[in-house]
Image (cartoon, rainbow, N blue to C red):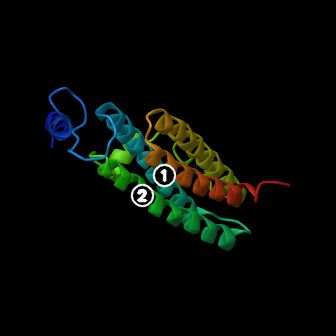
Amino acid sequence: MNKRNSQSKTSARTSARTSANGRARTFETRIDLKSEARQQMIGLLNQVLADLFDLYSQAKQAHWNVKGEDFYQLHELFDEIAEELVGLMDMVAERATALGGEALGTVRMASAASQIEEYPQGVFEGMQVVNALADRYARVAASVRDGIDAAEEAKDMSTSDLFIDVSRELDKSLWFLEAHLQR
């Protein structure tokens, strides 16, 4: 496939997701939020979904590649914290669709939208891997906390409550990671 056909197909997929005014398509819902608030929350939920999906893949990358004297313990920890993200991603995606939006949850969508730094290549040693993941967990947790405030300002307490749950789980995983680094 040549580059022009690839771009054309990408454009067609993107335009199928937007309405005539360039905004993401939404479906009718009886949820009593103003349309602008729903649009804002759907966008925010999809951003969090992308970041969580990217974080999940980075935790799995760490799980598969960690080396060193703490291998088994870290291998298991990284798998556990990655699996925690799966449930969070599902709740976030379902909230976006409950608000009448589309959950943008493929690997490619997440990759294109993620705001977190790429996992560093060539990092295998246990505590270096822990440090890299801790940085990324902290970044996503901070972003989710900003989302709590944005959801409250939009008067969407359900999304705010969801983000509080997500933040709590991210903070717990961050604690597990940082405990290995604290002396």
Neighbor class of circle 2 (other Cα within 10 Å; few <14, some 14-19, many 20+) is some
Residue drawn at the location 61% of the way across and 71% of the way down? 76
The reply to whether callout 2 and callout 1 are in contact (CB within 8 Å) is yes
Q: Position of residue 48 (x, y in %)?
A: 45, 45
| Residue 162 numbered mark, or none | 1
Let me know if residue 103 appears in the view. no
Extreme residue toward the top, this view: 21
| Residue 91 numbered mark, or none | 2
Q: CA distance from mark 2 to mark 1?
A: 8 Å
**Residue type at numbered disc 1:** Leu
| Residue 179 numbered mark, or none | none
Residue drawn at the location 65% of the way across and 50% of the way down? 134
Neighbor class of circle 1 (other Cα within 10 Å; few <14, some 14-19, many 20+) is many
Let me know if residue 135 appears in the view. yes
Quadrant where the N terminus sits is: top left
147 or 121, nearer to the observer = 147
Residue drawn at the location 81% of the way across and 54% of the way down? 182
Residue 177 found in image quarter: bottom right
**Which of the two labelled residues, at mark 2 and mark 1, occupies the earlier sequence position?**
2
66 or 2, nearer to the observer = 66
Find numbered disc 2 in the image and state the secondary structure of the residue it sits on: helix
Quadrant where the C terminus sits is: bottom right
57 or 37, nearer to the observer = 37
Q: Position of residue 180 (x, y in %)?
A: 75, 59
Mark 2, mark 1: which one is toward the viewer? 1
**Residue type at numbered disc 2:** Met
Residue 178 found in image quarter: bottom right
